Image (spheres, rainbow, N blue to C red):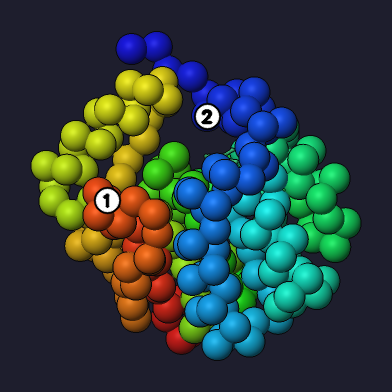
Amino acid sequence: MPEVDVHRIFDRFAHIYDTGWLQRALYAAVQERALAELRALHPQSVLDVGCGTGIFAARLDRELVPGGVAGCDLSGGMLAEAAARSRGVGWVRGDSARLPVRTGSVDAVVCTQAFHFFDQPAAWAEFRRVLIPGGLALVGMINPRTEGGSRLLNRVSTATAKTRVNWPTTPEMRRLATDAGFEVTAQHEVDWRFRRTVPLVLTVGRAPAA
Ligand SMILES: C[S@@+](CC[C@H](N)C(=O)[O-])C[C@H]1O[C@@H](n2cnc3c(N)ncnc32)[C@H](O)[C@@H]1O
């Protein structure tokens, strides 16, 4: 199957991405859950990886860390929408596997509904690199209940999107994070619209203290 670069898909899709029903159905619940976790942390700086059109990063800038939020995405089209949304956030184009961010410079990394597109071991390693010692990474995504479910969803969504997509189970997600040196402190199931069909889980990992 010929593969399409993921940023090209989102470049094409960017102008309709902010449709209200899509946001409510797929993205709002996990952002709400991640925001609640971040509030308890009182971070001074947050990096949103795979920030898309910047809805969540802009909200973090408004409600949690004014002037302390950066949003990173591979798609120039999505970032153009993001830049029009907020001037308070630092928008940067980059790949989750090679984040254009200084080592040990952010208190928290957040990633909602984007991790399935990433090179996942490389992304966890990058989250660890950019976080301060003891910093938190919060990754919200669909984690199928079984390995069979994961294989099926990977096949169907890779064929549909024409780009490689990977949805690990919750234990697999935990293993990916611990392999990169994180302590997984929680895996919260998010109350979202499709919860009976597929769980959406927010995995919270703490980087080593030093
Ligand atoms: C479904 S959107 C989610 C956007 C946003 N996080 C939200 O919750 O609305 C996925 C985003 O991940 C971005 N993306 C995919 N692969 C990426 C990568 N390797 N590095 C950075 N961003 C990536 C896409 O360009 C797209 O904007």
Residue located 82% across and 71% down the image? 67
Residue located 44% across and 76% down the image? 207
Question: How many numbered discs sit on the rendered protein?
Answer: 2
Q: Position of residue 3 (x, y in %)?
A: 42, 18
Q: Nearer the viewer, residue 40 or 101?
A: 40
**Lower sequence index among marks 1 and 2:** 2
Left/right placement of residue 59 relative to residue 168 reads right
Is ligand 1 less than 8 Å from the beta carbon at label 2? yes
Residue located 76% across and 69% down the image? 61
Inspect the image, locate mark 1, and give the three-letter code of the amino acid beneath it: Val
Given this view, does label 1 or label 2 mark the residue nearer the observer? 1
Query: Could you say whether the residue bearing mark 1 is in a helix, strand or loop?
Result: loop
Q: Residues within 10 Å of mark 2 (few under 14, many from 20)?
A: some
Q: Position of residue 77 (x, y in %)?
A: 72, 32
Asked if one can make out residue 182 in the rendered structure from this viewpoint, the answer is no
- Give the residue number, with chain letter if any, for mark 1: 198
Above-or-below relation of 155 to 145: above
Q: Position of residue 28 (x, y in %)?
A: 54, 58
Q: Which label is found at residue 6? A: 2
Q: Nearer the viewer, residue 138 or 95?
A: 138
Above-or-below relation of 56 to 115: below
**Ligand 1: image quarter:** top right
Inspect the image, locate mark 2, and give the three-letter code of the amino acid beneath it: Val
Query: Could you say whether the residue bearing mark 2 is in a helix, strand or loop?
Result: helix
Q: Position of residue 59 (x, y in %)?
A: 71, 65
Residue located 57% across and 48% down the image? 23
Q: Residues within 10 Å of mark 1 (few under 14, many from 20)?
A: some
